[in-house]
Image: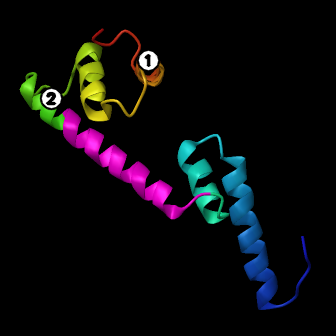
């Protein structure tokens, strides 16, 4: 890393530490995506699309929760139906199975 003196040295050090921390915590999907956007590897639109996806799925599951008893809990079958309805043909069966497995990992045994 280049050496500098004065105020510029502090700016360089902060920038270096920032990127280093993002790389260190890149196992976290949010940090990994932010690092890619920050380094210009992917467009900021990818991040915005991810936020829209999360917002849309949250809204869908809130609606489905109301339909299925409004108790804050849904069976994995209902979750799978919601995912299939949301993604339609844009995700293949293998991708939906992968998402469902992630739900199983996050919520083992819960409302099969």
At mark 2, the secondary structure is helix
- Apparent side of residue 49 relative to residue 41 in the rendered image (left or right): left
Residue 65: which disc?
2
Residue for badge 1: 97
Q: Does the magenta stretch include residue 48?
A: yes
The residue shown at (30%, 30%) is: 88
- Apparent side of residue 43 relative to residue 90 in the rendered image (left or right): right
Give the residues drawn in magenta, as a range.
Answer: 42-61
**Residue 72 locus on image (x, y percent):** 18, 28
The residue shown at (69%, 64%) is: 18
The residue shown at (42%, 16%) is: 104
- Apparent side of residue 54 relative to residue 42 in the rendered image (left or right): left
Answer above or below: position of 37 versus 107: below
What is the chief secondary structure element of the magenta stretch?
Answer: helix
**Quarter location, residue 58:** top left
**Quarter location, residue 36:** bottom right
Q: Does the magenta stretch include residue 3?
A: no
Callout in the foreground (1, 2): 1
* Mark 1 closeness class: few <14, some 14–19, many ≥20 residues within 10 Å: few
* Mark 2 closeness class: few <14, some 14–19, many ≥20 residues within 10 Å: some
- Apparent side of residue 90 relative to residue 64 in the rendered image (left or right): right
At mark 1, the secondary structure is helix
């Amino acid at each position: 890393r280049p050496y500098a003196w004065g105020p510029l040295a502090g700016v360089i050090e902060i920038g270096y530490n920032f990127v280093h921390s993002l790389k260190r915590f890149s196992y976290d999907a949010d940090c990994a995506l932010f690092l890619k956007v920050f380094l210009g590897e992917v467009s900021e639109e990818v991040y915005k699309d991810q936020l829209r996806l999360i917002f849309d799925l949250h809204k869908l599951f809130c609606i489905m929760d109301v339909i299925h008893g409004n108790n804050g809990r849904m069976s994995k079958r209902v979750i799978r139906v919601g995912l299939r309805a949301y993604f339609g043909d844009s995700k293949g069966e293998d991708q939906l199975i992968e998402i469902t497995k992630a739900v199983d990992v996050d919520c083992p045994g819960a409302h099969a």
